[in-house]
């Protein structure tokens, strides 16, 4: 490793797993290597679900230890990204107040109706530009407030999950821009916390820390940690876009000289599907509110104007049940079963709240179809096709709403993340959208994390340069539309069924 000028480490924490990924950049070619993988997930305790955030901290230390063993003591940067909305509360001694709740915890059921009695959704949207979801940090805090949670009486600081991990590693309390925007407590017009909204909802504005931009060098890794893991004392803590979707969108391999803003869309495809466009300024309008779009933070204070769609979660949960039954299915096996069954026979709305966290996803899907005057799908092929087709149709409807809101025509869709590997769903999406679909890179989140660190360290010039590096470094695939007339008819039936 002596011939490498700079080397950085991305800690990419998802809702079900975490990875430590090493990044090396040489002559505008990025090489990444997965150093360590570990599991993550909610811990059920009585009637609530929590995150083991201190366990994640331990896994980060283990990642650093493994880095030293393989690469040596020189590490120029560490960047952490995680899912959005969840947070940690600290007391006046900076001690964590209990374990943080999981966003799928049932404590926020029905909370939006209660919130709208305090302040209208129009006013909330005007303050924040964020779509209404019961999982938002604002909703979670309100559920605690209305439940007289004793934690709030001793709260001194509010930190999003990656901000808290950065604090443990660097000693610096700060909130990174992209992750702060997911809270529904940030104002994209004033570029600061939405203090008026915070006070109207009954929260203490003193809880909220300074906001820093992506690519900020927070400081050095704490000395006792460098001694423990064996790293050089000059190892930097760097904020990438700490929201994993934000980091992923940075790595979209779009040619920014070919497409203008609003002409290309992205789909970050994983457990959630995040579909949207990159804009210079927030889009806060009646249409955006009615379509439930959201304005989240991007690189260079840009806005990720997008819609949260329940993505691969539904099929992931079905696959889990099938494998518990001993079927041991691969994604290729599922695709084969889908191809055997009839098209456009079963339709679901992936965003229906019944699919958020049911006890049995297969049974829930079948019941949904019955309740919507359809026969229940049976078997792996019918159930999986219902999910894939409905997702593709949902993407089409979202694109139409997006075009109506920004008043521009989308010319191409880029799919990044784990869903970029799903050949069948990608082709379905191209068919129904009737535009090219370009897929890859799969590891977009880690790549975006790494390249923003290199941007902070002066090895990447700007966002155009960054996306050029992505195109040069990773395989990109293209899907062209097929059978568009059949898919158009299927889409019309879908719209009729889910109204």
Image (tube, rainbow, N blue to C red):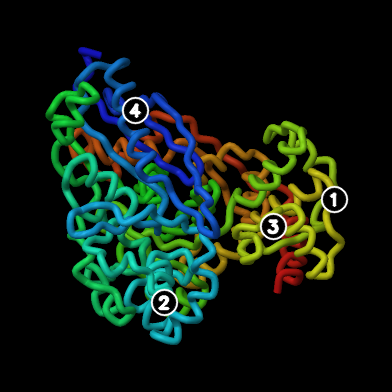
**Which of the 4 image quadrants contains residue 303?**
bottom left
Mark 3 vs mark 1: in front: 1
Tell me the CA gap for discs 3 and 1.
Answer: 16 Å
Q: Position of residue 276 (x, y in %)?
A: 47, 59
Q: Is residue 182 visible?
A: yes
The residue most toward the top is 2
Seen at 18% across and 28% down, the residue is 226
- Dot 4 lies on which element? helix
Tell me the CA gap for discs 4 and 1.
Answer: 45 Å
Q: Position of residue 496 (x, y in %)?
A: 75, 71
Q: Is residue 140 above or below residue 66?
A: below
Asked if the residues shown at circle 4 and circle 1 are in contact, with their CB atoms under 8 angstroms apart, the answer is: no
Seen at 31% across and 36% down, the residue is 450
Give whichever of discs 4 and 1 has the lower sequence position.
4
Q: Which mark is residue 62?
A: 4
Q: Which mark is residue 378?
A: 1
The residue that label 2 is drawn on is 146
Q: Is residue 471 above or below residue 216?
A: above
Give whichever of discs 4 and 2 has the lower sequence position.
4
| Front-most of residues 296 and 175 | 175
The C terminus sits in image quarter: bottom right
Seen at 21% across and 13% down, the residue is 3
Mark 2 vs mark 1: in front: 2
Mark 4 vs mark 2: in front: 2
Asked if the residues shown at circle 4 and circle 2 are in contact, with their CB atoms under 8 angstroms apart, the answer is: no
Using residue 100 as the reference point, say whether residue 431 is left or right of it. Answer: right
Disc 4 residue crowd, few under 14, some 14–19, many 20+, Cα 10 Å = some
């Amino acid at each position: 490793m002596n011939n490498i000028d700079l080397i950085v480490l991305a800690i990419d924490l998802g809702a079900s797993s975490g990875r430590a990924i090493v990044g090396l950049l040489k002559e505008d070619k990025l090489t990444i290597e997965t150093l360590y993988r570990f599991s993550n997930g909610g811990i059920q305790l009585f009637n609530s679900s929590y995150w083991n955030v201190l366990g994640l901290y331990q896994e980060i230390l283990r990642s650093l230890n493994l880095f030293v063993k393989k690469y040596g003591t020189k590490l120029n940067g560490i960047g952490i990204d995680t899912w959005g909305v969840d947070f940690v509360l600290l007391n006046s001694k900076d001690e964590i107040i209990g374990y943080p709740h999981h966003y799928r915890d049932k404590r926020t059921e029905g909370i939006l109706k209660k919130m709208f009695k305090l302040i209208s959704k129009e006013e909330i949207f005007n303050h924040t530009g964020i779509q209404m979801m019961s999982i938002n940090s604002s909703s979670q805090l309100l559920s605690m407030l209305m439940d007289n949670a004793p934690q709030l009486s001793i709260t001194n600081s509010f930190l999003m999950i990656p901000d808290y991990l950065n604090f443990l590693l660097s000693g610096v309390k700060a909130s990174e821009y992209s992750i702060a925007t997911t809270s529904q407590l940030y104002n994209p017009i004033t570029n600061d916390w939405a203090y008026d909204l915070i006070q109207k909802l009954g929260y203490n504005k003193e809880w909220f820390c300074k906001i820093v931009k992506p690519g900020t060098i927070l400081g050095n890794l704490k000395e006792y940690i460098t001694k423990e893991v064996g790293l050089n004392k000059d190892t930097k803590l760097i904020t990438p876009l700490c929201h994993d979707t934000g980091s992923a969108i940075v790595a979209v391999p779009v040619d920014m000289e070919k497409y203008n803003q609003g002409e290309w869309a992205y789909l970050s495809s994983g457990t959630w599907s995040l579909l949207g466009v990159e804009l210079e300024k927030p889009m806060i309008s009646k249409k955006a509110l009615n379509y439930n779009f959201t304005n989240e933070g991007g690189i260079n204070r840009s806005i990720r104007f997008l819609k949260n769609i329940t993505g691969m979660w539904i099929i992931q949960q079905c696959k889990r049940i099938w494998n518990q039954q001993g079927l041991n299915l691969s994604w290729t096996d599922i695709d084969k079963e889908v191809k055997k069954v009839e098209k456009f026979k079963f339709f679901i709305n992936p965003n229906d709240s019944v699919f958020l966290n049911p006890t049995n996803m297969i049974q829930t899907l079948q019941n949904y179809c019955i309740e919507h005057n359809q026969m229940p799908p049976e078997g792996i092929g019918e159930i999986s096709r219902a999910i894939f087709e409905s997702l593709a149709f949902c993407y089409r409807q979202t694109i139409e709403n997006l075009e109506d809101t920004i008043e521009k025509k989308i010319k191409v869709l880029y799919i990044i993340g784990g869903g970029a590997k799903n050949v069948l769903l990608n082709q379905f999406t191209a068919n129904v959208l009737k535009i090219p679909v370009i897929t890859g890179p799969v590891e977009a989140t880690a790549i975006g994390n790494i390249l923003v660190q290199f941007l902070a360290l002066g090895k990447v010039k700007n966002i155009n340069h960054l996306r050029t590096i992505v195109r040069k470094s990773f395989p990109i695939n293209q899907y062209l539309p097929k059978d568009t007339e059949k898919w158009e008819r299927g889409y019309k039936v879908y719209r009729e069924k889910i109204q």
